[in-house]
Structures are given as C-alpha cells and as structure tokens.
Image (spheres, helix red, strand yellow):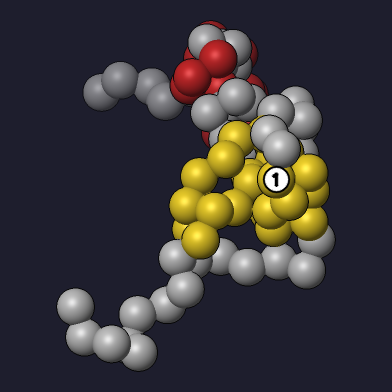
C-alpha cells in the first residue's frame, strides 16, 4: 500500500438508537463521543437502524392492508365501467 493516502482505520463502537445494542467493529468514521466497551475506550457512533432493530432482520415487518387501499382508491376515483 502507498503510504499516507489511506484514511485512519480504527476500532469504533456503533450503538443502535432504538434498541441500545452496541457492537465493536473497525471503521474510518470518527466521533467526539466515546464509550467504555469491553475493557477499552472507543469512539461512539450512534445509528438509527442496525440489524438489531431493522424490520427485515427482526421479522416484525408491517402488514400492508391492500384491500383497504383498493377501497380507498375506488372511493376517491370511482369504479370504472367496462365497455
């Protein structure tokens, strides 16, 4: 690798804002906030969604009421007569 062209790659703790779950990984992201985690002090990056709170990974996806949407569309635009 060429010297002095790569960003600083260091350990960082990411925290999920919804669940409070934290995990340690390496990243080029920086932060002024720090946290004591697993015996060390690391920069803390707070994220809105992680695998701990994302509906796809947790299995709590929303069920879309398609029948209600069709009725709403028909109320708004009417039923079209077939020729």
- Residue reaching furthest bottom? 4
Q: Residue at x 48, y 21 (%)?
A: 56
Q: Position of residue 70 (x, y in %)?
A: 52, 18
The answer to whether residue 8 is seen in the rendering is yes
Residue underneath mark 1? 40
Based on the displayed image, in which of its 4 quarters is residue 21 positioned? top right
Q: Residue at x 28, y 87 (%)?
A: 3
Front in this rendered view, residue 14 or 62: 14
Is the residue 75 above or below the residue 59 in the image?
A: below
The local crowd at label 1, few if under 14, some if 14 to 19, many if 20 or more residues have their Cα within 10 Å, is few
Q: Position of residue 71 (x, y in %)?
A: 58, 16
Q: Describe the element under mark 1 as helix, strand or loop.
A: strand
Is 2 on the left or on the right of 50, as rendered?
left
Q: Position of residue 83 (x, y in %)?
A: 25, 23
- Residue reaching furthest front? 39
Q: Residue at x 47, y 73 (%)?
A: 8
Q: Position of residue 27 (x, y in %)?
A: 48, 58
Is the residue 72 above or below the residue 17 in the image?
A: above
The answer to whether residue 74 is seen in the rendering is no
Q: Residue at x 30, y 20 (%)?
A: 82
């Amino acid at each position: 690798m060429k010297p002095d062209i790569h960003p600083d790659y260091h350990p960082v703790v990411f925290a999920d804002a919804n669940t409070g779950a934290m995990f340690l990984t390496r990243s080029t992201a920086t932060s002024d906030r720090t946290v004591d985690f697993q015996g060390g002090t690391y920069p803390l990056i707070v994220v809105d969604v992680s695998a701990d709170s994302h509906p796809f990974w947790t299995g709590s996806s929303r069920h879309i009421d398609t029948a209600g949407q069709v009725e709403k569309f028909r109320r708004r635009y009417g039923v079209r007569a077939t020729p």
